[in-house]
Amino acid sequence: MAKTYLEIVKYMVEAKFTIEGVVDKPDIIGAVFGQTEGLLGSDLDLRELQKNGKIGRIEIDVQQSSNKTFGKLHLPASLDRIETCILAAAVESVDRVGPYEANFSVDKVEDTRSEKRRKILARAKELVKKLLDTEIPDSKEISEMVQSDVRASEITSYGPEQLAAGPEIASSDELVIVEGRADVLNLLRNDIATAIAVGGAASNIPKSIIDLASQKDTTLFVDGDRGGDMIARSILNVADIDYIAKAPDGKEVEDLTRKEIIKALRTRIPVDQYRGLGSQNRFQRRPEPAQPMQTQRSELQRPEPRPEQARTQEPALAPRESPISSARTISQEVAKIDQKAYTPASSLGKAEAAEQEQKPVLEAQVMAQVATGLDELSGTLRSRLYDSAGNVQKEVPIRELLSEIDYSKGAYAIVLDGVITQRLVELALQKNIKAIYGVKANPLTRKFHDIVLYTKEQGKIS
């Protein structure tokens, strides 16, 4: 755009020219003024318009080649668009410059305010974007802010100890125990309203926590550090906890994202399993996601105790022998038990003899084959279900074993790289399972005569 002294330039006339000879800029400008003088009257005379500030100085871009002169002419104007277009047409009427023929052709009449409007529009977009990005939150952020504030206001105080708790702590059948108020608030922000805080006192667990844990399905959710392990041990010594969940290593519950919270609660483990394993291996293996809390609870309901059945023909079991340390030793012991349990048909009634005839002759060999699975699963935190032929029916993580037994059909034996619990034994009896092999066993409240129980540490326990 040509320079001009006009304060306001509304339009710019742009024309190109060709002159059949070599001329200079003053020659071209003089020809334009001279040949348009008096052509349009005094109101549109270029000299008068320039004196009155209606048009600016004419700018010429000149190039010369082969005895010809060509270039562009720029005429700024502050007239209206009709008068400007008349001036543009007048410029095209110039046909000579000095002694040479000339040809002027207007390329365009540009509204300079359009360019300003484009710049204004572009700048306005930048300002609006900056305002939206840095100053005004979007609707989702506003919703989250409002929800967070509302959730924070819903934290209640529970019990005489005034423990921080979610609003549904009294009405829900589920309970999540955490360390502090900030943990409760973070769970509440992520729609978990059944959390309660112990207050961070690992040495003095509030009585309200103990009472609630005895009444509800309870999950202890601790930080992923040494302090979390200490609080877990303290609470497990005094409260009836069902499951243990732990934050990722080095993180605290109050800092977890929604995804991390859900993952930690889904991969929780039963408290019996937590007690039976070393502290370094409790949360290292999580190969498959467990079911959500509500679904898992419904599937892992504690079964009704099975009444003991009287057995008139039950042979006396051998006294406990030394601990069994390998699958081969277990197999040998099983074979001994099987030989003792087999009573010749001649000493039984006809009906009992017929039933004994149907008992698989190779039962001891099947049990020996099943026992080898204990060594194969060592260190995996997994379990297997075997059929009566010694074939693997299913292999699942230990945390899913109870639910898998509940749905299984025709299972004959269980092998697990973990602890044999009374709940596991009772459920196995309901499913007519004949043997369970594990690393160790929790104390059992009664003897079980319908199932063979073996551990690496204790040997035969039933």
Image: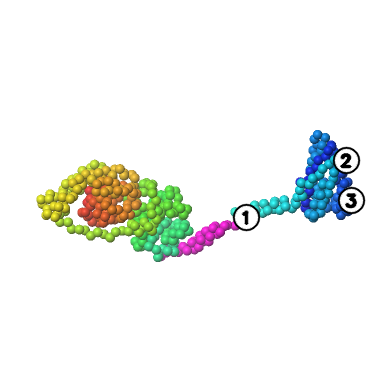
Q: Of the residues shown, which amino acid type is indicated by label 2? A: Gly
Position of residue 307 in the picture relative to residue 218 (left or right): left
Q: Nearer the viewer, mark 2 or mark 1?
A: 2
Position of residue 27 in the picture relative to residue 160 (left or right): right
Q: Of the residues shown, which amino acid type is indicated by label 3? A: Gly
Dot 1, how many residues are within 10 Å of its Cα: few (below 14), some (14-19), or many (20+)? few
- Residue at the image position 51 percent from the left and 61 percent from the top: 147
* Front residue of this view, candidates 335 and 232: 335
Which residue does the numbered mark 2 point to in the structure image?
98
Position of residue 333 in the picture relative to residue 153 (left or right): left
Residue farthest along the left direction in this orientation: 346
Q: Position of residue 136 (x, y in %)?
A: 60, 57
The span shown in magenta is 134-163
Which comes sooner in the sequence, label 2 or label 1? 2
- Residue at the image position 84 percent from the left and 47 percent from the top: 93
Dot 2, how many residues are within 10 Å of its Cα: few (below 14), some (14-19), or many (20+)? some
Circle 3 SS class: loop
Position of residue 122 in the picture relative to residue 138 (left or right): right
- Residue at the image position 14 percent from the left and 50 percent from the top: 343
Which residue does the numbered mark 1 point to in the structure image?
131
Let me know if residue 232 appears in the view. Answer: no
* Front residue of this view, candidates 277 and 309: 309
Circle 2 SS class: loop
Q: Nearer the viewer, mark 3 or mark 1?
A: 3
Decide whether residue 204 is among the magenta residues: no
Which residue does the numbered mark 3 point to in the structure image?
38
Which comes sooner in the sequence, label 3 or label 2? 3
Q: Of the residues shown, which amino acid type is indicated by label 1? A: Leu
| Marker disc for residue 169 | none
| Occupied quadrant, residue 444 | bottom left
Dot 3, how many residues are within 10 Å of its Cα: few (below 14), some (14-19), or many (20+)? few
